[in-house]
Image: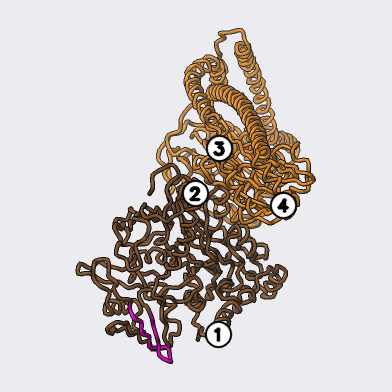
Amino acid sequence: MKHTACPFRARSSRRRNFAAIFLLAFLICATGTEASLRPQRGGTLRVQMSERIRSIDPRQWLSVPAQAAVAERVLPLVFDRLVRLDDHGMPQPALAVSWEHDVQAKRWQFRLRDGVKFNDGMPLTPEAAALSLQQLLGNSFDVSATSDSVVIQADHAVPNLPAQLAAGRYFIFHTADDGSLTSTGPFRVAEWPAAEGSAKAVFVANESCWSGRPFVDKIELTMGVDFQRQANAIAFGQADVVELPASQVRRAAQRGVRTVSSDPVELFALQFDAARPAVQDARVRQAISLAVDRSSIANVILQREGVAAGGLLPNWLSGYSFLFRVAVDLPRAKELLAATGREVSRPAPLVLVYDSGDAEARPVAERVAVNLREAGIVVQISGQAAGVKNSAAGMRLVRYHMATPDPGVALAEVLNALGESPASLETPEQAYAAERAPIDAFRVIPLVHVSESYGLGPQVRDWMAPRWGGWRLEDVWLAPVAGGNAP
Amino acid sequence: MTFRTKLLALFTVTIVAAVTAVAWGVSAYTRRAFELFDRQRTDALVAQFRREYAQRGEEIAHRVQGIADAEATLRMAIDLSRPQADASQYYNDARGIAGTQQFDFLDIVADDGTLISSAEWPARFGYKNDWVAAEKDWNSKGAFLRRVDMPDSVDLGLLAVRTIRVGEKHIYLIGGQRLNQDFLATLVLPESMRALLYRNLEQGFMASALTDLHGPVGQADSFAPLIAEVQRTHRELQKTIDSGADLAANSETFNAIPLVGREGDLLGVLLVGSSRQDLVQMLNFIRALALLVAGGVLLLELVLGWWISARVTRPIEQLAAGAREVAAGHWEARVEVHSRDEIGQLAGAFNDMTRQLAEQRERLVQTERVAAWRELARRLAHELKNPLFPLQLTVENLQRAREQTSEQFDEIFFESTATMRAELENLKAIVSRFSNFAKMPAPEFEPVDLNESVRSVVKLFEPQFSTVGRPPIAPELYLDENLARLQADPILLRRALENLLLNSLDAMPAGGTLTVRTSQHNGSVRLDVTDTGAGLTPEECARLFTPYYTSKQHGTGLGLAIVQSVVSDHGGKIAVESAPGAGATFRIELPLGQPISGPGANHSQAAPADPPVSSAA
């Protein structure tokens, strides 16, 4: 089976947009209005985010969901993958222009794009690409190089390998003699915070990028900025792109900030520690599922930037999430608890742990506690740093980021994070069954799916982020300030 | 204890009692004054608390009203009054408003009581606060105390509710502040006073619910009874609570003021405490001062009291000495009269008494002497009359015999002369006995073994113990072989022993047991002679040692008189114990050393109070 990519970059479609823009600019000029909608090069894009990543090395990719989500935004500034996903989640050529696999989908061959160079001037070779992928894919895969291709041999069938390679850590890089990493992406790292206290990274445009030079000259990325400071920064013109927690999107829009949101790509869910006696009984977990008012969380706490979730995947991704129950049934929950014949909160309250670094986790946890109190379960909430294990926790409020439009990949990642091991996810039926299994057993209780939102400054143009979140800063350009100098 | 000592002790007790009474009075007065002052301070603080409380309530109500009057709030109310209004956008508003108004609690509640936004517990949105919707005229109500549910606990808040009316719908604003130690910090407390707040949010007493300015109170359990009492009665109470190692110095008086909610439920207790340390220190000072004053006064009183009591008791001591001299037989004793007071009158009366006693004694002696001579004459006449009558009959018979034949005359003559000789011998014997009694020689002292004398005399009487024709008498000797030798006249002592044993033998005509016992006691030798005879009446005992007194047909009444005379001359004393039908015991006590000659040496006769005498000489 062979997939042939369009010889042009995806940006070719933008030429049509440029034509339209040009026509519009002409009309504006004709009416005496300043022509400012034409994409312009130059300027520094100031970006802020709350998370902080320690390294830009794909080999040090962290599996912590929040860290992975941030890396998914930052690393594509510097690195390219063999394949990218279009807005519909379909694999599209990137560094690989075409790919093919055998009947069993165990052996895959990706033909590399010609003329691509790393930003230190070294040409992209199949050997370099194979070496970097081999380090990232692990021992389940055997990666080799041919004259113009990279061959990946798996020990099992991987029918969606291109989709997998289009997300996550699977970047192509080259290790220079001094140990530094070089890449082929639209930007290169000019400054990276080495000191613990510094949180500012600077990326400059890669003039010789194979996909074309980005519009902005430089990106200043400030990490570790809390949401309130980010909101102030965007309000006072000190940043061009900031993160907005779901609960603040509406308020920011009311204050005149341009906001953009992805489709729901994050999942808040309750996960249980089956070893805790308080939640060993499935009826207790079912009662908890029936007592939680998901709509209130989505509509009030998350200010309608979330949707009540009955399944693990959002409906736009799976298409069947409406099959999962989300309605509240407090009487039934009380019946189930009464049927257990014991008080869940005795001798000690049930402990619900949430990520203390997640500003939205606490109110969600508090609301869950309120709902469960109505059902007769006293819950004590406790903030813990992400990744810290709390031995007393019977429940954990978890948040998963699905950085892929591929439902199979996303479900696999979520199930993997939940500790579930599905047999196969090749067909929608298999995916549905695999998703329903932990939900029906109440090992996990999905609560809400949340969008990823950003606040944009007035100069930011052409924000064309994918619907599953993240950035495409190479497409962004900065409009000149009215009455001021061009960027 | 002498009268002087008693008088001194009386002075001392009086002084100590007086100082104690004064110290107690001052202490009591000080305590009352302090408690009055403390009461006034506490009342002032309680009044201050009530003012602060009311002022804080008014301030809260005013600020809530300010929120209600704000344009943004009015816009929100208008928006929420629309059909299908989206209340979710106001979810975070309460927290922001509470922050600007420095409220700990702020709830925005819809017309039906549904919570729209909560500053203290945001996650509780959507739940009902029915108690708010039940009251419509909140704007005329002041602040009130209420239990506020928090995510993990229950808190106590001073709340005010205001309503915003849009059309027929109301929006309720519930704002307030936490009633905790921060509130206590606003009270201006004088030194040595403190205020505590007990938040009555749980059943029973919770030590952690009791706070002061700095947080939870140590040793909170000591307040449990007071809190429990207020919980039970809902009334203001006062109680003194001790704490710390020095309980008295660390005690505090607490006024417990119940804080109730709108429904009269007890939600808190304000405790206003006043340290009693100042009072305790003042009382200690007064006590120490009283002790010091009492000590000084006592010392002074001892000196002055000794002098005064000496002056007061000296005449009495002189009287006592005079009385002792009179008792010793010195009837001429007199005391000096120095004053005309009662003591002086007493001394004069004493002198009159001794003078009269001396005169009466003289008269008594003369009377006794006459009586003695009469008794002697009577006894002599009686004794002499018995032999004289046979003599008279014999002489008359002899005169009538001259008319008889010579043989008959001779026979009568010889018989008569023999009788006359016998009676004359009898008369000589009588005269000799009286002569011997009159001529009692002075004792010549030498070491004498009393036991040996007793054995010798008992041996002398052995034939009489078993005389044919009369019941036998069994002698029993219990002699102390360790008896020391005493200074005595052996002849007189033997004579006394003979008379004593003879008296006992005469007392047992029907036989019996004669017991002689010797022993040594406190520097003297004791001799007990006991018979088992008929015993004596008290009257007989009283006259037993009187010369010429006898209860026997043929006694002279001199035997026991001789014994008493010998014992007296040896500085000893004799006594008798007896009862009718129980025999009699004569007890002689003789000093081991040389007897002291003096007036008392001859006064060894048994006192009238002694037990009855059993036999007579």
Res B607 label: none
User: Marks 4 and 2, how far apart in space?
Assistant: 62 Å
Secondary structure mainly formed by the magenta segment: strand
Element at badge 3?
loop
Q: Which residue is mark 4?
A: B129
The chain assigned the colour brown in the figure is A
Residue A278 shows up from this direction:
no
1 or 3: mark nearer the eye: 1
Q: Within the magenta stretch, is there residue A313?
A: no
Res A30 label: 2
The residue lying at 58 percent from left, 84 percent from top is A429
Q: Chain of mark 4?
A: B
Q: Which residue is mark 1?
A: A430
User: Marks 4 and 3, how far apart in space?
Assistant: 45 Å
Give the colour chain B carries in the figure: orange
Under mark 1, the amino acid is: Gln
Determine crowd level at label 4: few under 14, some 14-19, many 20+ residues with C-alpha closer than 10 A.
Answer: some
* Disc with the residue nearer the chain's start (2 vs 1): 2
Element at badge 4?
loop
Q: Is residue B84 left or right of residue B352?
A: right
Determine crowd level at label 3: few under 14, some 14-19, many 20+ residues with C-alpha closer than 10 A.
Answer: some
In the image, residue A328 lies at what x, y percent? 68, 68
Under mark 2, the amino acid is: Ala
In the image, residue B588 lies at what x, y percent? 54, 41
* Disc with the residue nearer the chain's start (4 vs 3): 4
User: Marks 2 and 1, how far apart in space?
Assistant: 59 Å
Magenta-tinted stretch = A98-112
Q: Which residue is mark 3?
A: B251
Answer yes or no: are tags 4 and 1 on the same subunit: no
